[in-house]
Amino acid sequence: MSTETTVKGSMGVPMKRKEDPRFIQGKGNYVDDLSFPGMLYMAIVRSPYPHAEIVNIDISEALLVPGVKAVITGKDLEAAGLGWLPTFHGYDKQMVLAIGKVLFQYQEVAAVFAESRGAAADGAEAVQVEYNPLPVVADPFTSKTDAVLLRPDRESKTNHIYHWEVGDRDKTTQALAASDTVVKQRMWFPRCHPAPLEPCGCVAQFDAMGRLHFHVTSQAPHVYRTAISIVTGIPEDKIHVISPDIGGGFGNKVPVYPGYVCAIVGALKIGRPVKWIESRTENLTSTGFARDYHMDVEIGATKDGTVTALKVSTLADHGAFDAAADPTKYPAGMFGIVTGSYTFPVAHAEVDAYFTNKAPGGVAYRCSFRVTEASYAIERGMDMLADELGLDPVELRKKNFVKKEQFPYPSALGFTYDSGDYHHTLEVALEKIGYKDLLEEQARKRAKGELMGIGFSTFTEVVGAGPSKHFDILGIKMFDSAEIRIHPTGSGIVRAGTKSQGQGHETTWAQIVAEELGLDPQNILVEEGDTDTAPYGLGTYASRSTPTAGAAIAMAARRIRERARKIAAHLLEVGEGDVEWKDYRFQVKGVPSKTVTMKEVAFAAYTNMGQNEPGLEATQYYDPPNMTFPHGTYIAVVDVDRETGEVKVRRFLAVDDCGTIINPMIVEGQVHGGLTEGFAIAFMQEIQYDKDGNNLNTNFTDYLVPTSLESPHWETAHTVTPSPHHPIGAKGVGESPNVGSPAAFVNAVIDALSPLGVRHIDMPITRDKVWRAIRDADAKKG
Amino acid sequence: MNLQYTGEETIPADKAIVWKSINDPAWVGRCLPDVIDVIVHDPTHFDAIAQVGVGPVRGKFKFKFELMPSAAGDRMDMKITGGGFGSAIDLTAGADVVEAGPGTTKLNWSGQAIARGPVAAVGGRVLDAQAQKLISQTFANVRERLTAAG
């Protein structure tokens, strides 16, 4: 028997993150840490007007500022054929620098290149732009009238961008008309922003051979390479995109921004590297926002609470350009998941999107393309239905859940849910939170006039975009990839088309390889984000990394195992068919004493391979057969101060089912982070515009990010229902807490206020909104 | 952010002197609070650079002025556009010039300011008071300078 030790069972182990030592020592390597000889700095002149003609741009004073080397405007770019860049889904375009007019406040108008960051800022201040203000369209309801046409550059002379619908409109209308009860509510999921702590930035540098090396904060480096090639005409082999360490993305670092194009143009024009790093205000005011969906939700049901139909009509505010980073065929993303965890026999959802004088975006902020909006709509709606029927929201949910035996479940809006056990997850959550005791406590408090609420969200997500027959960005199918090389001494390297921004890929990808090959995860190096070395992939967002690249890694490892089997047979001096992989090593069937480890096989692959091909490596592209459908039960318990409107989140329990868990500690960390963001969205965050189109939340004084002081204590637990089509049964978890939690928070607050007759409050549920709701309710009662 | 203000200044000077002064672009430019420089282009147009501080947004703002005197000589309107630090401020101000007895003239003024950009967002909480101060101080300076010239 082999004397070599084997590392057993790397899957499901709470291994400490391999990447953390460099982060906790402050030794991460971010874009702004980079410096190259002769590097210039870029600053962007931005419009203070939300909608205005550009009468004149005078750069003469800027060019006199010491250190300023060049200034470019939209006209310069237009002359070079670089005036516009395509948005990712391919049916709109975005100005790089304003041409003719500006369409939102803080829009990019000119770029200044200088020897220092300060000189670039001074140069930007010296650029004189003369504007002629135009009427402002600050909401989609006004936009809908077409009284002011915002985008005359488009063939279609209307502010309406698209109409999207799914489901059966007529049958849904009929079913609603025939229902015993119908609840209706307009819900606004406000405009919010991912606000990664590291803003966006880049360094563009051309080498002596004219090859572009582009360091950038990108969640999808390969897509950037292709997009840059399409926009600039530089052949793709002459473009090298590198995403170094990234300080959070949450969807904000998926789109290609105008600043990137300007930096590349500046580097080319001046012949020196150019660095551009956004300020916090630039990040919040001009890069991809999220949500901004005005949703009219209708749910029909029988008297006993069996749901009969769901209809959701949405007005979407997309801002000045349709820069939503959705897959091409899904302009409203995965909003069709709006039927949630429930067996609606019929449903219809439609979205109409409009331009406004606001920043462009509509990115998937820690969600798989509009899943958060959908989850919020259905989970709020189910609570309203329970309230209308006088039912316990838990019993209503149980009555209408898709049952375990119904999977794979075809939803009324076209998805086929892969697996789940909603009843079990809910029961685990009820047990852990002590629901019965909470109800008794609530009854006692209500008798005393105190306001206590219990809120549920039993959501289902759809993630892992996605199958090539449905999903593409700029025409590129949304597969992902992995390449694994095992070195002679049994260590190895795995490269993937994804890009971690804090998700812990350096650890979890190593654990998958280690599990499949019986190697030590500590000796598996993970490399991502370099387009010269990593295989082509669509990147990390929308909880797609584990469902796609995670699968590719497992399958590439299995290919290696199959190649290794031949070498193992050679070493064990038996036929290949007599060798089996058992207990993390190769063994002669029926002879437990005759084994070789993967480490021994790896050495032999380079030293004693017999008639077999030398080396031990594999590349795998993975085109998922279906999406994955994580689910969960979240419960919030809140106390509301009747006098001040202050909401205190006393408890929050998240029971997630994300299928197979690779690293429970990383999953717990992901859930904590997502819940904190969901908490912020529910109670604090909104990018507000006044009626004149002024952005009022331009910094962290006005756009709040919770610290540990504000955040509740998070309780977490898991159930495990593996995905039947994923090679390791994993579904992805990074976004579940952001998707599922806002509805639980809001449902809890409304439950607390329900004795007063309060039915709905739009997020963010600030103290003053709650206070006003209580005051108004009291006034009604006289 | 749209702000509106009104006020009144009583000036111990003849209406003719007041009217002549407020038709002089260089003279009017120097009435702005914290003015740094005034560049006169023609009898009705001038630029002024002033130090402005609105909350944390502080720095030099450049304004273009257009004087619009009434033919009857009893009202002066001004259109002011400008900005700095990525902000834009558009102001319109007007004053009825009214004789109020021998050697006394009243300026009944009103103003409207529209602020856009960081000035509106970051300085929003203090903008109202600052804008009012800017406009009222300008008319107060008109009174003070004419009183001193007296």
Image: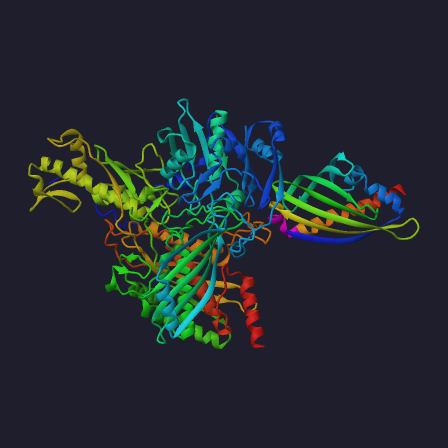
The residue range painted magenta reads B120-126
Residue A152 in the image: x percent, y percent? 52, 45
Q: Quadrant of the N terminus of chain A?
A: top left
Look at the image and say whether residue A187 sits in the magenta stretch.
no
- Residue B140, placed above or below residue A28: below
Question: Residue placed at 38% from the left, 38% from the top?
Answer: A221
**A171 left or right, relative to A104:** left
Look at the image and say whether residue B124 sits in the magenta stretch.
yes
Residue A605 in the image: x percent, y percent? 17, 32
Q: Quadrant of the C terminus of chain A?
A: bottom right
Question: Residue placed at 36% from the left, 65% from the top?
Answer: A170
- Residue A21, placed above or below residue A650: above
Is residue A394 something one can see in this rendering?
no
Residue A719 in the image: x percent, y percent? 29, 59
**A190 left or right, relative to A631:** right
Q: Quadrant of residue A242?
A: top left
Is residue B114 something one can see in this rendering?
yes
Q: Nearer the viewer, residue A17 or B101?
A: B101
Q: Main secondary structure of the magenta part?
A: helix
Residue A477 in the image: x percent, y percent? 31, 43
